[in-house]
Amino acid sequence: MPPQTISPAELSDWRRAVPFFLAYALAPLAWISAIYGGWTVLLVPLVAWYAFAALDYVVGLNKDNADPNATDADLTLYRMVTLFWTPVQAALLLSLLWYVPQAEHLSTLERILVFFGVGVVTGTVGINFSHELMHQTNKLERWMADILLSMVLYSHFRSEHLLVHHRYVGTPRDAVTARYNEGFHRFYPRVLRESLTSAFRAEAHRLEKTGKRWTDAANPFWRYWALQATFVVLALLLGGWSGLALFLVQAGTAIWQLELVNYVEHYGLTRKHLGDGKYEHVRPHHSWNAAHRVSNWLLINLQRHSDHHYKPDRRFPVLQNYSNSEAPQLPFGYPIMTIAAMIPPLWRRVMNPRVRAWRDRFYPEITDWTPYNTGQTPLPR
């Protein structure tokens, strides 16, 4: 069946919006793992990774596109998906920080695994929803994004993503663009280090252009640090030192989940250097696309990443899918691709031929890819 165009009236039908609330099912699973312990501590990763991957296989792809001219009034239910999540995640995290450290039926390992599962939730859902919220101009939505990121101690992601990643994606200045043949285990420590420093420099530079120093109250890092400190203190008050340790487990897990996705989204894809330190404009073919229906419900269309970078101001329900001729396609959805990324030989076997085919298709005139492989092409001004 050829792809269909969904009108704004059809898009506003509640039956189209409800599947995107599927992410909320992970929250009670985290509580079940804490109450029952045992094998149930693996419920969240089993469902988030394997169940959704299996459903992708059964249900298949969704290549239909919504009318991108749909208004916020048409998207009210979809906005509720992301706005309601912030209080839900805060309640989940804080209640488990109180309950788990004093739960005598849980061993130390079980407690760690419960919060590993919580980290899968706060990373897979929380950071992803914050990504949607931070792209909006509405102050409430941006505050919700900051609160979600502070729960995983990764608040600088907003500055890095908006000021650095979107501007420099596919160039050496973007730490988040994984280079060809760069395994995840090399990418991860590099991106942790470089993204923090690049985010801080970007905010300092933005303030400098208005005659302000980085110490000015307008620097969002002050808000980031205050919100993060608030959740660290709450973890201590609710669960003591054990609670703080478990809080750090979930934060570390969430960050790992985020950077796994970042690794997958742009692996090996680069923008053409035009000379004089300048690069071509971002196009849909500079991000990997995935049309897998069920994991896109869970990830609110994040896998339509080609369109997100091409049109960053679009809300998730109207992100467009692209054909093979327009954007490179992942063979599976993120649940499977992120697992593959943890196994570099497998990842290279699956993805390197696809990167080479992408180069042949979109840049047949480039014969020497060495500067792009090593990140040595000149930086944009």
Image: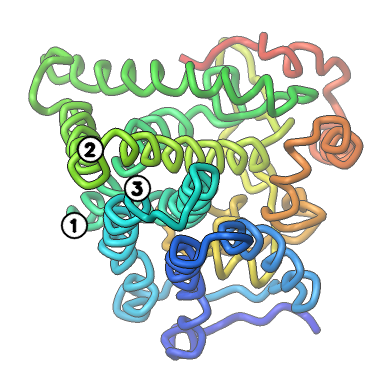
- The residue that mark 2 highlights is 236
Q: Is residue 283 left or right of residue 248?
A: right
The residue drawn where x is 12% and y is 15% is: 215
Separation of residues labelled 2 and 1 (CA atoms):
28 Å
Q: Identify the residue position indicated by label 3 in the image.
A: 101
- Characterize the local packing of mark 2: few (<14), some (14-19) or many (20 or more) Cα atoms within 10 angstroms: some
Q: Quadrant of residue 60?
A: bottom right
Mark 3 in CB contact with mark 1 (< 8 angstroms): no
Which-is-in-front pick, marks 2 and 3? 3
Q: Name the amino acid type tagged 2.
A: Leu
In-image side of 183 versus 241 (left or right) = right
CB atoms of marks 2 and 1 within 8 Å: no
Badge 3 density bin: few <14, some 14–19, many ≥20, Cα 10 Å:
many
Up the image or down, 204 lies above or below 159; here it is above
Find numbered disc 2 in the image and state the secondary structure of the residue it sits on. helix
What x and y, as percent, mark residue 146?
Answer: 27, 44
Q: Nearer the viewer, residue 91 or 347?
A: 91
Numbered-mark total: 3
| Residue plotted at (80% across, 35% down) | 343
Asked if one can make out residue 344 in the rendered structure from this viewpoint, the answer is yes
Residue 346, percent across and down?
Answer: 87, 37
Disc 1 designates what residue? 140
The answer to which quarter of the image holds residue 224 is: top left
